[in-house]
Image (spheres, rainbow, N blue to C red):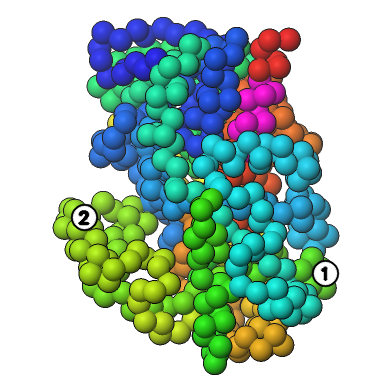
Amino acid sequence: MYTDFEDPNALSEFSCDVCIVGAGAAGISMALRLANTPVSVCLLESGGFEPEPATQSLYEGLSLGHERASPLGCRLRYFGGTTNHWQGWCAPLQELDFTVRAWIPDSGWPLKRSDLDPFYDAAQSILELGSDDYERPEGIGDEASWRALQEESVNVHTWQYSPPTRFGKAYREALDSANNIHVVLHANVIELETNHHANAVESVHFQSLGGHAGHLTARCYVLACGAMENARLLLQSDGVQSSGLGNQSGTLGRYFLQHPERKVASVLTDSADRLVHLFDRTRANNGSSRAHLTCSKQIQRRYSLLNAGFDIIPQRHFGSGYDALRGVVHDIRQGEWPNDLDTRVWTMLSDMRQLGGDLYDRASGEIAGFDLVAHAEQAPNPESRVALTAERDRLGMRKLQVDWRLTSDDKRSILESTLRIGEALASANLGRIKIEEWLLDGDSWPQPIWSGCHHMGTTRMSDSPDTGVVNRDSRLHSVRNLYLAGSSIFPTGGYVTPTLTIVALALRLADHLQGEVTS
């Protein structure tokens, strides 16, 4: 069932077993897992079914440090969340990402990869992924080439591609038909009301932009609003605990992580066809995939490296339509919605039709060269953080400032990893690399550097309340009925896109809450 809270006649008081705040990948996945069970669920969403400038503006804030960390950019605040413009790349975190690595301070999860494996399997279906094999590039390239690379201490992995799944459209009907799910649209949570010890949430207060106020009581509460907004709501909830709800350790809002992503080298080769065969995106009956490279665990340990994935991307001339697409993507990533979006997209589509193929069709576009592109892990850094400002939005919520900080060791790791990948390509007779000047330029970082828009880490998971915000069950250490979902709980982020892991963790949490409520 759906209720639009913009309607002044809508109910203003709600109660349920589980209240989920935020209808993005995490929130909708949890609701789907709990659908048609004995657990009653209320899903509160700030927006409606379509984008609205007034609602989107509630994300406005300040950006310090590296400029690719705008609180407004990347995120979408309506039903389906950021899956509404997600590109569909998927891969699970690797076993190494969960372990304590002595050369990376504050690394390690309270969970093991095996703890998530059953939920990764279930997440595959929700994300409409055709293959769950991320370790072997089935049907891509040739075995001899992969063997030659792996002999040089390089691992081969694959990205799998979701259609991409737009959660707001794909699962709207399923939530509507569930007998135990109530979705409330245009319900902006403005306060988590706790008891006087701040160890339990007693109710959630929310409001529409039109001024309609409501509140909800539940047995368990889940914040599933993304890494920035989860931290913002907890920091804002300072009525009893002045530093923010659940912030006894002082880590709330800290350890903000993203994935530095950038071209690191050109690949010079006389084996262009071979590189295309190995690394270009491949379509199959069960979806599409693309191979990429990482340094082995042994190499990462030997050189004290963070994890990183490397794509070899053929550069093609597609014409004015592709240029239009790149311009649109740039503007949206900067947090802008171009007024001439429709015209520019239609220009792109027209040009693509004239080429007789889509963007990933190998037969379309003349190859102009190859880029080596890194998707890098960022080291946990307590000085990289989100915090509240004194400025308030139209609901009276304090706005965020984001201070995304990368260190010299983050850059050193990318350079060393690039060199190791280059050595492997040369030994396998696939080409040599010409490293980009920015990567050789001391400790400085280019501006802008793309972040992947993968916000993580502001409410990190830990076994000890002294080093994190939530425990291994995703519950706040200090609040017995408040849980967090999404990538805000990642202690480390690996290099892969977080969506598959977000969904897996959300399904795991849903099962835990069902046990809590029905036991």
Residue 347 is situated, as x and y percent measured from the top left of the image, at 19, 63
Does residue 407 appear anywhere in the picture?
Answer: no
Q: Which residue is mark 2?
A: 341
Q: Residue at x 80, y 52 (%)?
A: 99
* Residue type indicated by callout 2: Leu
* Residue 151 position by quadrant: bottom right
In magenta stretch: residue 508: yes
Left or right, 405 with reference to 467: left
Q: Residue at x 82, y 73 (%)?
A: 302
Left or right, 154 with reference to 312: right
The residue lying toward the viewer, choosing from 297 and 256, is: 297
Q: Which quadrant of the rendered structure holds the C terminus?
A: top right
In magenta stretch: residue 284: no
Q: Which quadrant of the rendered structure holds the N terminus?
A: top left
Q: Is residue 519 above or below residue 46?
A: above
Residue at the extreme bottom: 270
* Residue type indicated by callout 1: Gln
Q: Is residue 232 above or below residue 368?
A: above
Q: Which residue is mark 1?
A: 298
